[in-house]
Image (cartoon, rainbow, N blue to C red):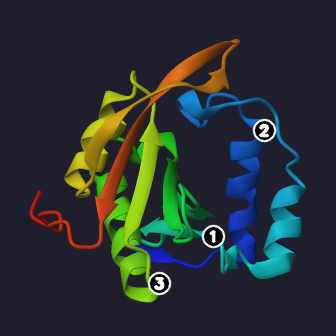
Amino acid sequence: MRLRPVVAGDLGLFERFSVEPGLIGLDWSGFRDAQEVGRRFAKDGYLAADGGRLIVAVDGSAAGFVSWAQRLFGGVAPHWEIGIALLPDWRGKGVGWRAQAMLCDYLFTHTPAQRISAGTHPENVAEQKSLVKAGFQLEGVIRAAEFRAGAWRDGYLYSRLRDDPAPDPSL
């Protein structure tokens, strides 16, 4: 398994996540402009100074992607917020936590960020376990954090700091 830059052949995968309601699971928030995928790729190949995406490749196949975006909690020092979207066939196989751990290693190696955060839904127990395996710690509940499926919903916030112990790769 490895993370690699996005290539033009991957754009169809991103377009699917924009227009197939069940594909992204709980994160579905309505149809999105599928053409934005190509415009963003043409602009910066999904590798910008303030965020981007990498493909999660397993045995040469695109299993999904990881993403990161610069956020500012307070003060002047930004941190990264990461996310992941895997195709259904790759879920539950240990790909997600490994990809998130690899993305953290990448960001801590190539940027001065001290903090990486990730959010998930209270009902997404698999992602909660994945984040813990990837070295994240639960920080707490963010009440009414998102509007999804017609209602305001809580979220869970996790973080990993630069000096936190690295995850155990043998898991």
| CA–CA distance in space, label 3 to label 2 | 33 Å
- Label disc, if present, on residue 111 of the rendered structure: 3
Mark in front: 3 vs 2 = 3
Binning the other alpha carbons within 10 Å of mark 2 as few (below 14), some (14 to 19) or many (20 upward) gives some
| CA–CA distance in space, label 1 to label 2 | 22 Å
Tally of marks: 3
Mark in front: 1 vs 2 = 1
Q: Nearer the viewer, residue 15 or 69?
A: 69
Q: Position of residue 116 (x, y in %)?
A: 41, 62
**Who's the residue at 64% across and 74% down the image?**
6
Q: In this view of the protein, can residue 70 be seen by the observer?
A: yes
Amino acid type at mark 3 = Thr
Binning the other alpha carbons within 10 Å of mark 3 as few (below 14), some (14 to 19) or many (20 upward) gives few
- Of callouts 3 and 2, which one flags the residue occurring earlier in the amino acid sequence? 2
| CA–CA distance in space, label 3 to label 1 | 11 Å
Q: Report if the CB atoms under discs 1 and 2 are less than 8 Å apart.
A: no
**Who's the residue at 65% across and 22% down the image?**
148
Is residue 97 found left or right of 118 in the rendered image?
Answer: left
Q: Nearer the viewer, residue 119 or 129?
A: 119
Is residue 148 found left or right of 132 in the rendered image?
Answer: right
Residue labelled with disc 1: 51
User: Circle 1 — which element?
Assistant: strand
Q: Nearer the viewer, residue 17 or 111?
A: 111
User: Circle 3 — which element?
Assistant: loop
Residue labelled with disc 2: 19
Residue closest to the far front:
75
